[in-house]
């Protein structure tokens, strides 16, 4: 048994609407049940604290020993390691010689990828509001919340709006105290020492007891409270110096330790923090009491847990000695044993919610302190006898202002009411918004690129920052920022990550859906143009019905509207699968389409062609949008496929909230030439011959080009055609038959054999053309593309049309430069 292939589908996909790992296995001679293997892999993830969610298995049709296993995951590396370990264990009868070592490696991966409790609280709160959350890498606590121009960044509890200067001030505790003191906020008296002698001098001047802590420390590291003698000050100074070059010496404030969370200009939560301690029972040692407490399920290592394990380190041992104890001592029943001088949760402390008890003047003081430092999210540390009383009445003081404060004490208090601190931070970041920009996803067999560009052009013309992905690249506000085939997951992510983008228009290809899933959890508008035979036999998709299921992933992800082709039965069938509340908007090339008629008569919105007009039904009104021949992309109305693309674009724009005027202006000014939309019906003139260059590579596309040529040509119709060699023989023959019906003479070349012998693909296409009745003298196999075009051009005369199917913009540019010169925008 072995793994053949493994993919991480990071968004909605063919198998599920959530991220999953797809593993293709070959059982070979193994008797292991694929379902048992999947369950074991899932259980291993769950043992690591990763709620993977689900698993399913399915046999690969026609391959008895091969199975697809689909499992959920939280961390890709953990899921991958868990599946491999589960498989190895199954092959070896359930146990491995190095199993313990492998499990430790799995735990290490889980630890490295674990999200801190505070960060998780904010991220989970964002997701609960429907705000997209993307972790930048699996081992970083940096998240992108939202998309495009509405996105925010989050790291721990620090947002992208947090001032770098403010963080620097908060990191310098003495500078913070100075600013607060200058503005009338009570702080402990003190100063900064660089040597033990300076620390002793400060302590003497302040009079004991004093507190020592690193000038720029955090999480309570290096802090010693209530130093009562010169010896204790010396030891505390050495301890603090382990975490910073300079040390604050300040007057010890008597009272309890409180943490107040300020975000969005309000107090979101407050907690009474208690230092770690254990309660003697008269029989257990201090070490045993600590071990028992550390076994509590809420305690663990680091910030991924609700509480932190208590460490019996040197600081704890010093405190034990002060109490006349050692780790092996047995405290009396009821004796409270202190193990830390500070109450930080990161050192094992606990917290009790006191949000409702905070005195109004203290609330105002905390908000003012955060504003003085410049923090949008701040953790304010206060020491006083009672947080319900005003600070000046009890000699209380504001001790510190912390950037990136931990919020697990508020989310998971040991006592009192839990507070949704993460949601408070999200509210401050986004208000009542969801951080989403409009996303229009376009899929289908043919027409995706042109339709996507039509929509993007219209959005940009309307004044929106526009991000567009197509098979030609990624464009931000009209500038190509990435070149190449960019109709998949990573390209879409790059658009959604751009702060310059107010609306994303994403060409979404079959391959991208199958290889990585969608780049978004949902889109505003999902467009499915058509479904016909293409790429069959690849990636496990054997039939057009199966291909339709792939395309339907886009429609099923629509949150606002799905635009479907009423002339395509596969598209029509998708309407029944849409999410509840999602609008269906149809488009059709005839006003007599029965599906369209029923939809419009029942009040539905739609776009269709009627007597040369693009018509729209919107808000119970039916009216013309524009003349089809007024769209430059339709070549005077002859390119009916671009009329259909225009209708789909109009329907998508209606669904996204654009006005009729904006849509008409966009379609009327979109030019489909080699500069704006290469290889999509680019028209040239040469010696009286009309040359049309197009990306056609499947039967449906060639049929559409044949119809266009028949409509445009005054003379003969000649075509230079090809297809990738990895297409099934039946599909190649179908291309030949289709082109035989659409053109008078065919020249077949080969650009991408993909495993076939030279000349084999062209021969199969020509066989199909002969089957359709074409004479031998009308058929030519010329493998090099330049020679094929030259021979075809030589056969053309004035008034003829030459259609050149080309998959390379560079090749097209080279050939047209030699024969045709500048492109020509055909309007008649």
Image (cartoon, rainbow, N blue to C red):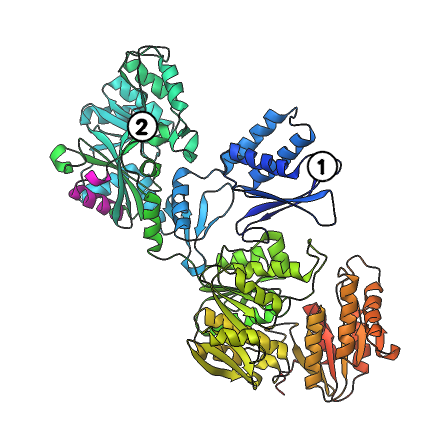
Crowding near pointer 2: few (<14 within 10 Å), some, many (20+)? Answer: many
Question: Mark 1: which secondary structure?
Answer: loop
Point out which mark residue 638 bears: none
Is residue 781 covered in magenta? no
Identify which residue, 35 or 533, lies in the foreground: 35
Point out which mark residue 223 bears: 2
Look at the picture and state if 463 lies above or below 612.
above
Residue 761 placed where, x, y %? 81, 64
Look at the picture and state if 55 lies above or below 650.
above
Q: Main secondary structure of the magenta part?
A: helix
* Residue 371 in view here: yes
Looking at the rendering, the stretch of residues picked out in magenta corresponds to 355-371
The residue sitting at 87% across, 79% down in the picture is: 777
Q: CA distance from mark 1 to mark 2?
A: 56 Å
Q: Is residue 547 left or right of residue 374?
A: right
Residue 283 placed where, x, y %? 34, 10
Q: How many numbered badges does the structure rendering display?
A: 2
Question: Mark 2: which secondary structure?
Answer: loop
> In terms of sequence position, does the residue under pointer 1 or pointer 2 come before the other?
1
Identify which residue, 521 or 668, lies in the foreground: 521
Residue 514 placed where, x, y %? 62, 54
* Residue 672 in view here: no
Point out which mark residue 1 bears: 1
Query: In front of the other: label 1 or label 2?
Result: 1
Residue 196 placed where, x, y %? 30, 24
Q: Is residue 685 left or right of residue 116?
A: right
């Amino acid at each position: 048994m072995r793994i053949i292939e493994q993919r991480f589908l990071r968004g909605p996909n063919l198998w599920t609407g959530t991220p999953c790992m797809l593993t293709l296995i070959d059982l070979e001679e193994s008797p292991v049940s694929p379902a048992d293997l999947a369950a074991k892999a899932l259980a291993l993830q769950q043992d690591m604290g990763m709620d993977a969610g689900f698993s399913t298995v399915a046999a690969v049709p026609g391959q008895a020993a091969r199975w697809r296993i689909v499992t959920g995951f939280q961390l890709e590396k953990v899921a991958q390691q868990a599946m491999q370990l589960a498989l190895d264990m199954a092959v070896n009868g359930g146990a491995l010689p190095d199993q313990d070592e492998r499990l430790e490696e799995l735990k290490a991966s889980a630890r490295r990828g674990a999200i801190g409790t505070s960060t998780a609280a904010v991220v989970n709160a964002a997701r609960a509001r429907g705000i997209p959350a993307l972790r930048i890498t699996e081992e970083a606590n940096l998240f992108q919340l939202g998309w495009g121009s509405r996105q925010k960044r989050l790291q721990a509890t620090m947002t992208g709006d947090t001032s770098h200067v403010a963080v620097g001030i908060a990191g310098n505790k003495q500078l913070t105290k100075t600013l607060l003191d200058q503005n009338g906020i009570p702080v402990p008296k003190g100063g900064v020492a660089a040597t033990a002698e300076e620390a002793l001098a400060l302590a003497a001047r302040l009079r004991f007891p004093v507190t020592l802590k690193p000038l720029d420390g955090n999480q309570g590291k290096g802090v010693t409270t209530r130093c009562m003698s010169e010896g204790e000050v010396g030891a505390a100074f050495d301890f603090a110096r382990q975490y910073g070059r300079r040390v604050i010496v300040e007057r010890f404030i008597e009272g309890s330790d409180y943490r107040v969370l300020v975000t969005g200009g309000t107090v979101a939560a407050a907690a009474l923090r208690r230092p770690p301690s254990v309660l003697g029972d008269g029989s257990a040692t201090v070490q045993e009491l600590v071990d028992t407490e550390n076994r509590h399920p809420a305690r663990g290592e680091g910030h991924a847990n609700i509480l932190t394990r208590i460490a019996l380190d040197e600081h704890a041992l010093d405190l034990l000695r002060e109490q006349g104890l050692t780790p092996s001592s047995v405290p009396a029943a009821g004796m409270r044993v202190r193990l830390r001088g500070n109450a930080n949760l990161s050192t094992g402390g606990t917290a009790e919610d006191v949000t409702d008890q905070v005195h109004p003047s203290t609330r105002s003081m905390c908000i003012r302190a955060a504003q003085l430092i410049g923090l949008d999210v701040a953790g304010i540390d206060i020491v006083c006898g009672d947080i319900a009383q005003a600070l000046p009445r009890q000699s209380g003081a504001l001790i510190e202002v912390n950037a990136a404060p931990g919020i697990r004490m508020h989310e998971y208090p040991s006592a009192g009411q839990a507070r949704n601190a993460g949601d408070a931070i999200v509210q401050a970041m986004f208000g009542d918004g969801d951080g989403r920009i409009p996303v229009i996803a376009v899929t289908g067999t043919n027409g995706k690129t042109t339709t996507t560009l039509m929509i993007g052009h219209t959005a940009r013309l309307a004044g929106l920052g526009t991000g567009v992905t197509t098979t030609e690249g990624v464009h931000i506000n009209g500038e190509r920022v990435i070149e190449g085939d960019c109709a998949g997951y990573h390209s879409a992510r790059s658009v959604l990550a751009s702060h310059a983008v107010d609306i994303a228009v994403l060409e979404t290809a079959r391959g991208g859906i199958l290889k990585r899933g969608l780049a978004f959890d949902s889109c505003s508008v999902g467009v499915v143009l058509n479904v016909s035979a293409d790429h069959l036999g690849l990636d496990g998709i054997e039939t057009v019905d199966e291909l339709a299921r792939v395309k339907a992933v886009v429609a099923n992800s629509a949150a606002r509207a799905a635009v479907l082709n009423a002339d395509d039965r596969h598209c029509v069938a998708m309407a029944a699968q849409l999410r509840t509340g999602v609008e269906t908007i149809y488009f059709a090339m005839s006003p007599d389409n029965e599906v369209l008629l029923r939809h419009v008569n029942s009040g539905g919105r739609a776009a269709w062609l009627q007597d040369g007009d693009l018509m729209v039904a919107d808000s119970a009104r039916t009216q013309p949008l524009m003349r089809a021949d007024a769209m430059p992309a339709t070549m005077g109305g002859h390119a009916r496929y671009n009329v259909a693309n225009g209708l789909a674009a109009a329907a998508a724009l209606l669904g996204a909230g654009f006005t009729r005027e904006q849509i008409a202006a966009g379609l009327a000014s979109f030019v489909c030439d080699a500069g704006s939309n290469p290889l999509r019906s680019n028209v040239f003139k040469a010696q009286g011959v009309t040359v049309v260059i197009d990306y056609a590579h499947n039967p449906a596309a060639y049929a559409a080009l044949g119809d266009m040529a028949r409509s445009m040509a005054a003379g003969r119709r000649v075509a230079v055609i090809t297809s990738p060699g990895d297409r099934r023989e039946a599909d190649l023959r179908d291309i030949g038959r289709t082109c035989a019906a659409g053109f008078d003479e065919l020249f077949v070349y080969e650009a991408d054999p993909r495993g076939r012998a030279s000349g084999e693909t062209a021969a199969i296409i020509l066989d199909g053309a002969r089957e359709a009745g074409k004479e031998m003298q009308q058929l030519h196999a010329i493998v090099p593309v330049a020679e094929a075009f030259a021979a075809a051009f030589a056969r053309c005369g004035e008034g003829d049309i030459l259609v050149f199917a080309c998959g390379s913009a560079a090749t097209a540019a080279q050939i047209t430069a030699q024969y045709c010169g500048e492109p020509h925008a055909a309007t008649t």
